Image (cartoon, rainbow, N blue to C red):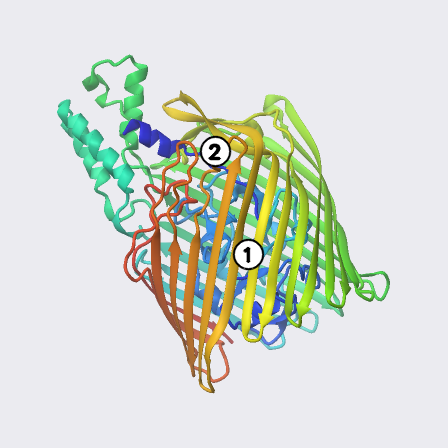
C-alpha cells in the first residue's frame, strides 16, 4: 500500500499551455455559424447584437476561430466550476481535482499556461498555483464563455502559451437597455449531488445615459453519488492487500480501517460544495463612448476528498523514521484522517472605459482595470491549516485602429501586480510579489480571399521573494502570424506559426515544503530560466453546403520546458518533487463536424461529431503526465415545434502512456439524454430543460485529474433546470 499510496499522493502536476478548439456550440446555433466567420452572433437572451470575441478584438481574430458556449448549451453544461462547463468542447478537458475545484485544461495542459479571464481581465486568484484551488469565477452569472486561441491570445499574456478562457458577464452593462427592466433567471436541481442552484439578474436604465445591473447566485451540493467504489481497482486492491498484511500481524483495528476505506462506494465522502455571489455595476453612455464600474463578492466552501488510507500511510512512515519500534507504541501516533476543506472569499472591483476618437487613425481607446482581494483558507477538520492571501491589480489600455481598406488592428499596454502570501505550518510558497508590464499589438490584413493576422507581445516580469532575499527579472518576446485562404465561399484553410516565451512562476521558482491538499513535498528552483516554444498549426474551417467543419492539427516544440519531476527522495513521509527544465514536444488534433440529416418544415434532425487527441513527450523520452487520451463524441438533436431532443455519447480511451509514478485510467463511455421545451412560439426566452447524464451509471475517471484514483466522475444524474429572460 505504501508505495502506491505515495505514488498517488505525489503524482506530478505538470501544466503546459495550449490553444483552444475552434468549436463548441450546438449544431445549427447562430454562435457556431458566426464563430467560423468572425461575425456578430444573435444572442437568444436579448434583442441586441453581441460579438463572439472579447472587447477590443471583435473585428479581429477571424483566423483563430474563437469557441463560444452560450444560451441553451451553457444551460445544459451548467456547473459550479468553469473547467467542468467547458469539458465537452474538443481540445478542452478539466483538472477535476474535486467537484468544487476544476480548472480548464486546453490540449492537455493547464495551470499558469492557461489564462482564465473575467471580461478580459485575469481572475486574480490562486487557482493557477495548484489544482485544489477553485477558480474564483461563477459560471452561473456568465452571459457566455469564450475559448481564445491563435495570435489574439497575445493580447492577454505570453504565459498563456496557447490559450485563454474568457468568462463574459454583464456586471458592467455593455449597452443601454432598450426596455424598462430586463430580468434573467436560472434555477436548477439534480439528484447525483442533491444540487440546488439559482441565479437572478436585473438590468435597467437610469435616465437616458445610465445603465444599472445587479445579480446574485447561489449553489449548494451534497457529497456526490458515484458508480461503484470510490477507489480505482488498482488502489482498492492495494488497500485490501495492506489490510490482509495488517491482519496477519495481529493489527485488527488497522486492517478494519483499511478495508473500510477500500469499500467506500456509491457516495464520494467530503465532495460537498456551497457557493454564492453578488454583484452590481453602473455604466454611463455618451454616443460611442462609455465608462463603467462594477463590484462583486464571491464566496465558496468545498470539501477535498481524501486519499483512502492516508492516515495509515503516514503512520507507516513514522514507524520507519523511528527505527521499526514496537507497532503498538505508535498506533496512537498515526495521523487521524480528518476531512480537508477550503473556504474562499474574494472581493473584486472592475473599471471599463471606451472613448470614441472620431475618424482619425485610431477609432477608439479602451481601458479595463480589475482589483481583487482574495483569501483562501485550508481547513484540517475545524482547524485552520494554511491561509493564502492574494492582493492583485491588473489593467490594460488599448488603442483600436480604424479600419482602412483591408487593414485593421489594435495596440496596447498591460500592467499587473500580484502580492501573494501564505501563512501556516504548510505554507510551501514564500511571500512574493509578481509585477508585469507588457506592450502588445494585433494586426490584420484582408485581401479578399486571403487574410493575414499577426500579433506580438513584449513582457517584462519581476518576481520578488523578499523573505528569501531573491528577486528574478525576465524579459520575454512572443509573436504569432497566421494566414487563411478562402477556398470557396464560407470555407477557409490556413496555418498559424508562433514563437512564445514564458517566465517561470513564483511557485516554480520558490516552492519549498509540504502541500496539504496535493500531499506532495514541492521544491522550486530559483535558477530556472525562460521557457520558450515554437508552434505550428493548420486548420480547415467553414461550411460546405449545410455541413459545418472545424479541424485543427498542431505541433509545438518547447525549449527548456518547466516541469515537476520526482526526485526519488522522501520528506515528512511524502515524495519529493522538484521543478526542472528540459525540452519537450507536443502534437495533436481537434475536429468537429455538424450536419443536418433531415430538414423539414416542422422537424429537423442534426448530427454532431467531435474528436480530439494530444500526445506530449519530454526530451528524455518520458511522457508528460496527466495528458488526456483520445476522446470521441457523437450527438443527434431533433427539433420539433417547441421541443429539442438531444442524445449524446462521449467516449474516452484508456490512458496507458504514463509518466513516472502515474497510474493508468480505463476507457469509458457516457450516454447523456436531454429534452428542452420552449413554450413560446418563435422565442427561446423561456426554456425548461430535463437531462439524464451518464444514463447507464458508468464509472469514469479523468486522466487529467491529480485525484483520478479516488475521485471518479458522478454516476447517473437526473437534472431539471429552467431559464427565463424577459
- Image depth: mark 2 or mark 1 in front: 2
Against 51, residue 715 (above or below) is above
Q: Secondary structure at mark 1?
A: loop
Disc 1 target residue? 21
Q: x, y percentage for residue 697?
A: 28, 57
Q: Is residue 566 visible?
A: yes
| Residue at x 62%, y 74% (from the top left corner) | 48
Crowding at dot 2, Cα within 10 Å, few <14 / some 14-19 / many 20+, comes out as some
Crowding at dot 1, Cα within 10 Å, few <14 / some 14-19 / many 20+, comes out as many
* N-term mark: 2 or 1: 1
Q: x, y percentage for residue 517?
A: 41, 36
Seen from the viewer's position, the closer of residues 408 and 633 is 633
Disc 2 target residue? 622
Against 65, residue 185 (above or below) is below
Splitting the image into 4 quarters, where does residue 21 fall? bottom right
Q: x, y percentage for residue 574?
A: 38, 26
Q: Is residue 146 visible?
A: no
Left or right: residue 460 compared with residue 199 = right
Amino acid at each position: 500500500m505504501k508505495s502506491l499510496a505515495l505514488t498517488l499522493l505525489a503524482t506530478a502536476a505538470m501544466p503546459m499551455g495550449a490553444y483552444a478548439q475552434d468549436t463548441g456550440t450546438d449544431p445549427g446555433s447562430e454562435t457556431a455559424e458566426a464563430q467560423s466567420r468572425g461575425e456578430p452572433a444573435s444572442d437568444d437572451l436579448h434583442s441586441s447584437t453581441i460579438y463572439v470575441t472579447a472587447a477590443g478584438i471583435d473585428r479581429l481574430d477571424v483566423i483563430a476561430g474563437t469557441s463560444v458556449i452560450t444560451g441553451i448549451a451553457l444551460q445544459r453544461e451548467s456547473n459550479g466550476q468553469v473547467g467542468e462547463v467547458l469539458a465537452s468542447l474538443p481540445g478542452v478537458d478539466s483538472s477535476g481535482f474535486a467537484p468544487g475545484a476544476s480548472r480548464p485544461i486546453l490540449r492537455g495542459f493547464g495551470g499558469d499556461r492557461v489564462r482564465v479571464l473575467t471580461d478580459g481581465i485575469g481572475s486574480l486568484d490562486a487557482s493557477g498555483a495548484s489544482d485544489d484551488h477553485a477558480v474564483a469565477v461563477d459560471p452561473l452569472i456568465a452571459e457566455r464563455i469564450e475559448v481564445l486561441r491563435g495570435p489574439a491570445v497575445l493580447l492577454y499574456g505570453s504565459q498563456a502559451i496557447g490559450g485563454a478562457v474568457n468568462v463574459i458577464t454583464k456586471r458592467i452593462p455593455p449597452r443601454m437597455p432598450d426596455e424598462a427592466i430586463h430580468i434573467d433567471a436560472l434555477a436548477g436541481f439534480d439528484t447525483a449531488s442533491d444540487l440546488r442552484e439559482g441565479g437572478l439578474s436585473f438590468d435597467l436604465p437610469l435616465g437616458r445615459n445610465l445603465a444599472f445591473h445587479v445579480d446574485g447566485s447561489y449553489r449548494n451540493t451534497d457529497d456526490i453519488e458515484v458508480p461503484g467504489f470510490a477507489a480505482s481497482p488498482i488502489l482498492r486492491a492495494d488497500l485490501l492487500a495492506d489490510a490482509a498484511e495488517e491482519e496477519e500481524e495481529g493489527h485488527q483495528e488497522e486492517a478494519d480501517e483499511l478495508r473500510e476505506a477500500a469499500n467506500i462506494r456509491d457516495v464520494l465522502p467530503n465532495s460537498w460544495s456551497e457557493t454564492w455571489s453578488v454583484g452590481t455595476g453602473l455604466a454611463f453612455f455618451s454616443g460611442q463612448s462609455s465608462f463603467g464600474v462594477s463590484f462583486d463578492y464571491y464566496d465558496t466552501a468545498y470539501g477535498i476528498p481524501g486519499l483512502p488510507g492516508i492516515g495509515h500511510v503516514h503512520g507507516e512512515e513514522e514507524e520507519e523514521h523511528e527505527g521499526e519500534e514496537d507497532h503498538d507504541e505508535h498506533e496512537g501516533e498515526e495521523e487521524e484522517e480528518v476531512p480537508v476543506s477550503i473556504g474562499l472569499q474574494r472581493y473584486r472591483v472592475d473599471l471599463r472605459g471606451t472613448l470614441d476618437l472620431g475618424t482619425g487613425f485610431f477609432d477608439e481607446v479602451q481601458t479595463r482595470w480589475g482589483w481583487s482581494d482574495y483569501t483562501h483558507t485550508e481547513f484540517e477538520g475545524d482547524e485552520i491549516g494554511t491561509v493564502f492571501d492574494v492582493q492583485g491589480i491588473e489593467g490594460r489600455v488599448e488603442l483600436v485602429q480604424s479600419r482602412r481598406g483591408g487593414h485593421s488592428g489594435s495596440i496596447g499596454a498591460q500592467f499587473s501586480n500580484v502580492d501573494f502570501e501564505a501563512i501556516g505550518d504548510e505554507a510551501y510558497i514564500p511571500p512574493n510579489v509578481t509585477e508585469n508590464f507588457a506592450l502588445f499589438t494585433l494586426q490584420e490584413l484582408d485581401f479578399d480571399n486571403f487574410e493575414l493576422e499577426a500579433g506580438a507581445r513584449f513582457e517584462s516580469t519581476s518576481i520578488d521573494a523578499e523573505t528569501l532575499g531573491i528577486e528574478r527579472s525576465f524579459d520575454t518576446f512572443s509573436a504569432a502570424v497566421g494566414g487563411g485562404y478562402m477556398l470557396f465561399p464560407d470555407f477557409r484553410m490556413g496555418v498559424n506559426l508562433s514563437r512564445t516565451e514564458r517566465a517561470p512562476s513564483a511557485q516554480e521558482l520558490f516552492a519549498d515544503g509540504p502541500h496539504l491538499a496535493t500531499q506532495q513535498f514541492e521544491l522550486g528552483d530559483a535558477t530556472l530560466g525562460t521557457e520558450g516554444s515554437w508552434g505550428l498549426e493548420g486548420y480547415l474551417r467553414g461550411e460546405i453546403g449545410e455541413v459545418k467543419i472545424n479541424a485543427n492539427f498542431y505541433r509545438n516544440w518547447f525549449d527548456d520546458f518547466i516541469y515537476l519531476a520526482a526526485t526519488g527522495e522522501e520528506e515528512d513521509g511524502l515524495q519529493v518533487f522538484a521543478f526542472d527544465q528540459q525540452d519537450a514536444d507536443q502534437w495533436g488534433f481537434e475536429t468537429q463536424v455538424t450536419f443536418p440529416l433531415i430538414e423539414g418544415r416542422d422537424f429537423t434532425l442534426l448530427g454532431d461529431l467531435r474528436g480530439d487527441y494530444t500526445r506530449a513527450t519530454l526530451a528524455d523520452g518520458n511522457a508528460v503526465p496527466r495528458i488526456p487520451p483520445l476522446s470521441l463524441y457523437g450527438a443527434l438533436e431533433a427539433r420539433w415545434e417547441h421541443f429539442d431532443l438531444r442524445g449524446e455519447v462521449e467516449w474516452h480511451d484508456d490512458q496507458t502512456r504514463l509518466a513516472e509514478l502515474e497510474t493508468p485510467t480505463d476507457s469509458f463511455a457516457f450516454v447523456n439524454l436531454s429534452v428542452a421545451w420552449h413554450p413560446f412560439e418563435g422565442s427561446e426566452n423561456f426554456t425548461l430543460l430535463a437531462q439524464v447524464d451518464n444514463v447507464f451509471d458508468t464509472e469514469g475517471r479523468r486522466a487529467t485529474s491529480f485525484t483520478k484514483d479516488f475521485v471518479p466522475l458522478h454516476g447517473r444524474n437526473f437534472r431539471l433546470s429552467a431559464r427565463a429572460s424577459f
